[in-house]
Image (cartoon, grey):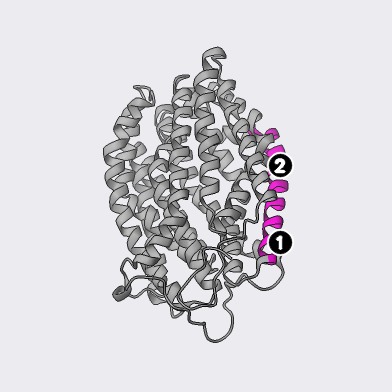
Amino acid sequence: MGGIPGRRRHGGKDSAGDLTKGPIGKGILMFAIPLFLGQLLQQFYNMADAWVVGNFADNNAFAAVSSAGNLIFLITGFFNGIAVGGGVVISRYYGAKDKVGVTRSIHTNLLMGVIASVLATLLGLLLIPRLLVLMNTPDSVLPQSLLYFRIYFGGVATVILYNICMSIMRALGDSLHPLYYLILSSLTNVVLDLLFVAGFHWGVGGAAIATVFSQGLSAALCLIRMCRAKDDMRLDRKQVRLYPGIMKEVLSQGLPTGLQGSVISIGNIVVQSNINAFGAYAMSGQGAYAKVEGFAFLPITCMSMALPTFISQNLGAKEYKRAKQGAVFGIGFGVLLAELIGIAIYFIAPWAIGIFVKEPEAISYGLIHAHITVLFYCLLAFSHCAAGVLRGCGKSIVPMLTMLLFWCGVRICYVTVAIRFFPVYQTIAWAYPLTWGLSTLLFLVFLLKSDWTHGMEYQEKPGKLSKGH
């Protein structure tokens, strides 16, 4: 049952998901475009909740929904990081044409997702109420925040299982089917938001129910697709088990990413607690800006999501030069695009933030945050894309340590100390470009000074993946 599976070549023609052949730029972009469209629809989950609540409920309800992201990611980010690690392992076996390795990796990842869903539900229901109090959540917002989180984490299994299935499909080069399912579930989410919040006046509870139901629909569609597939993606309930060797690989790749996401969320929670101290208008203003940023940064996010699959497949196929060329293209394209988007957002921010909130005081807080951060999107893009490259070659501990140091440690220290000397909202906003810049410098040094492809090659000897040259 356990151990590393032997190598078995795929038969027939190369799969459409094979990123080891063809023009590099075109291959990455064609893979990233469906990811972008899928993530765009994913943002509609949040936007629909925020827009409907912001327009059909009060400012306190909007503050509760719009400030939920960091706490949600504190828990789900850890388990989604495990899914990312599983995708890297699957991609490497797929690039090496190891059918047994692909099959065992898929079924191990699925069972780990079920276990993660149970743990995330328990952690969310037990920890979130206490964390909301520690974050200085205003008394006017707290009851609605509690209601939203209890419903969300009661159904968080739908979110985690969807991310597991999406990671599996993406690792095999299929970024289209998750997009199709998100189209349907996003439309469902909008309809349910309008029905529950605007029609039934259920407030934040209705928004949470709509989100959970819609995510569950996409997860179910992914599972049905995988059960009916006739290729490497096929699920067989008889093979659903934890293969020890595969599980060890998944955890070694995924734990650093998961820990990184959760600990960075702690840093953002500390920042959010300082924002909360400025009141409900600051919470809703920053939350509205966060929605705008979520949309604006989607193309770069998707580039950083495409790079691990491209890098991992090519290293599995021993296409080392191609992997490096893809890294250069992906990082360069991401940085340029990010800066162009940042310049555009700088000028349209008043209108964009006004989509989500109407109170002038809330909009003013959002504008402060936008005008300080958006011109530094190039730094954020470099860090995200470089982290994607390193995860693809199995060095996930490097982005973990880098981001924990700067996006958590330095960010917390800066905000905690600086706000005492400069007690204005601008002080908080500057925490982001400062820490993005520091992480970019470290990533740049590492990529230039090290042979980052070392250690992840698939050896010809059956049954073993090398851990060195």
Which residue was labeled with disc 1? Answer: 325
Q: Residues within 10 Å of mark 1 (few under 14, many from 20)?
A: few
**Residue 202 shows in this picture:** no
Main SS of residues in magenta: helix
> From the viewer's perspective, is residue 162 above or below residue 404?
below
Q: Position of residue 36 (x, y in %)?
A: 59, 55
> From the viewer's perspective, is residue 149 above or below residue 3?
above
Range of magenta residues? 321-349
Number of the label disc, if any, that sits on residue 123: none
Left or right: residue 23 versus residue 267 is right
Identify which amino acid the numbered label 1 is placed on.
Gln
Q: What is the residue that sits farthest to the bottom in this orientation?
A: 12
- Mark 2: which secondary structure? helix
Q: Position of residue 263 (x, y in %)?
A: 44, 39
Q: Position of residue 214 (x, y in %)?
A: 39, 54
Identify which amino acid the numbered label 2 is placed on.
Glu
> From the viewer's perspective, is residue 13 above or below residue 134?
below
Left or right: residue 119 versus residue 329 is left
Q: Residue at x 38, y 59 (%)?
A: 217
Label located before the other in sequence (1 or 2): 1
Nearer to the camera, 383 or 146: 383
Nearer to the camera, 459 or 61: 459
Cβ atoms at labels 1 and 2 below 8 Å apart? no
Q: Position of residue 293 (x, y in %)?
A: 58, 39
